Image: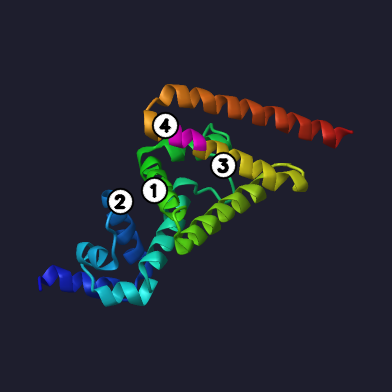
Amino acid sequence: MEPHEDGRRQRYAHRRDELLAAATEHVLENGLSNLSLRKVATTVGVSHATLVHHFATKEGLVSAIVDRVLTRAYSSPDLRSEEGLSPLQALWVRAVAPAGQRSIRLFLAITGEAMHNNPDLAAAVDRSIRQRNALLEHGLIAAGCPIEQALPLATYLLGTMRGLMVDLLVTGDGQRVDAAFEFLLRGMDDIRARWLQDDQT
């Protein structure tokens, strides 16, 4: 065995996060086709037993990757805005950036597999979507959204953004998709205006 492989085995032995990052990069580069723990282990440079120790099964690894790629693409738990951008714009900028597009492309591929009689992956996708919705729900409440409206609105916003991302990934027509996103932003401006009116009455 090559010395650098031994070094990587030691490096990843007790570092699940680093191992997950390396495995995620492998899947981002190679997709889900013929994915196996043994193939990932060979590429990453660790033993099959190490992956089994940390993730138990291929589905366990993919479940962890789902959470990681969604966090990377939609990573704004408290919805702090970036310089000059609203929180929703900041989410969109991260999503359409090259790293965000890679992550969402993989998530959509995993979602496709999950819908074809794979209950383990379906559970991972379901959990991740619910987590993203919950994060956005809390941010909306902090921004003044009535509590009873926050989760439906979060679901609408993230669902619409996912649909726009599918369009962008399939067609590559960024100008048209960005223009469509502007309609979503205008709709949010109208919704915020209604929050203010309700507070004043």
Disc 4 versus disc 1: distance between alpha carbons? 15 Å
Magenta residues (range):
163-168
Disc 3 marks which amino acid? Leu
Left or right of 174, for residue 201: right
| Residue linked to disc 1 | 109
Secondary structure beneath label 4: helix
In the rendering, which numbered label is found on residue 158? 3
Task: Please report contact status of discs 4 and 1: CB closer than 8 Å, yes or no.
Answer: no
Disc 1 marks which amino acid? Ala
Disc 1 versus disc 3: distance between alpha carbons? 17 Å
Q: Is residue 67 above or below residue 153?
A: below
| Residue linked to disc 2 | 31
Observer-nearest of 148 and 76: 148
Observer-nearest of 167 and 145: 167
Secondary structure beneath label 1: helix
Q: Which percent across, then down, holds residue 113? A: 41, 53
**Which comes sooner in the sequence, label 4 or label 3?**
3
In the rendering, which numbered label is found on residue 168? 4
Q: Residue at x 36, y 44 (%)?
A: 102
Task: Please report contact status of discs 2 and 3: CB closer than 8 Å, yes or no.
Answer: no
Task: Please report contact status of discs 4 and 2: CB closer than 8 Å, yes or no.
Answer: no
Secondary structure beneath label 2: loop
Secondary structure beneath label 3: helix
Left or right of 127, for residue 19: left
Q: Which percent across, then down, holds residue 83? A: 51, 35
**Which comes sooner in the sequence, label 1 or label 3?**
1
Tell me which secondary structure the magenta stretch mostly adopts: helix
Disc 2 versus disc 1: distance between alpha carbons? 8 Å
**Which comes sooner in the sequence, label 4 or label 2?**
2
**Which comes sooner in the sequence, label 2 or label 3?**
2
Disc 2 marks which amino acid? Gly
